[in-house]
């Protein structure tokens, strides 16, 4: 199959870059690296469920990824990344202060997941994603254990 849509291939490349690289996009979306490569090369077209998974993993809208509709990912420069880092750091510090006040602690794997969820929230402020991340952060915090004395 030859999918000669250079616009889609260009958007796929941007989505892969936004996710870190094609391998990270594959991991984050649950799609094989080979399939991602096929989409990037234009030798295959993804089905709707895969478009949704890739769009979510890259933090772009499915309409933009599929058809170039709406606004695409921003070309975030160093100042934007610094702001992103500050938002995540401030949120994490707030959580750590709260846990310390409650004399609770999080396991290392839960703290890592919390950071990942905060990054998703700071990088993708859509209402549906925001609610999903807030629910997951609540679940993570509910797993906190009493701090050792």
Image (spheres, rainbow, N blue to C red):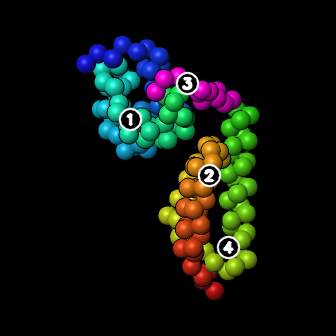
Quarter of the view holding residue 53: top left
Q: State the SS at label 3.
A: loop
Residue highlighted by disc 3: 69
Please say whether residue 68 is one of the residues in the magenta stretch. yes
Q: State the SS at label 1.
A: helix
In-front residue for pair 18/147: 18
Q: Which mark is residue 48?
A: 1
Please say whether residue 15 is one of the residues in the magenta stretch. no
The numbered mark, 2 or 3, whose residue comes first in the sequence reads 3
Residue highlighted by disc 4: 99
Estimate the spatial distance between the alpha carbons at disc 4 and disc 3, rounded to whole Å. 43 Å
* Mark 2 vs mark 4: in front: 2
The numbered mark, 4 or 3, whose residue comes first in the sequence reads 3
* Mark 1 vs mark 2: in front: 1
Estimate the spatial distance between the alpha carbons at disc 3 and disc 1, rounded to whole Å. 15 Å
Q: Is residue 69 above or below residue 33?
A: above
Residue highlighted by disc 2: 130
The numbered mark, 1 or 2, whose residue comes first in the sequence reads 1
Give residue 147's position: percent from left, percent from top: 61, 80
Q: Is residue 120 left or right of residue 8?
A: right
* Mark 4 vs mark 1: in front: 1
Give residue 36's position: percent from left, percent from top: 36, 31
The numbered mark, 2 or 4, whose residue comes first in the sequence reads 4
């Amino acid at each position: 199959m030859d999918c000669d849509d250079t616009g889609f291939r260009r958007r796929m490349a941007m989505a892969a870059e936004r996710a870190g690289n094609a391998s990270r996009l594959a991991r984050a979306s649950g799609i094989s690296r080979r399939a991602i490569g096929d989409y990037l090369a234009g030798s295959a077209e993804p089905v709707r469920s895969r478009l949704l998974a890739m769009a979510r993993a890259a933090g772009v809208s499915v309409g933009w990824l599929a058809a170039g509709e709406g606004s695409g990912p921003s070309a975030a420069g160093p100042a934007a990344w610094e702001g992103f880092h500050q938002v995540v750091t401030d949120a994490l510090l707030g959580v750590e202060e709260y846990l310390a006040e409650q004399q609770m602690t999080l396991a290392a794997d839960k703290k890592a997941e919390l950071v990942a969820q905060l990054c998703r929230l700071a990088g993708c402020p859509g209402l549906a994603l925001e609610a999903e991340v807030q629910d997951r952060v609540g679940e993570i915090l509910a797993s906190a254990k009493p701090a050792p004395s």
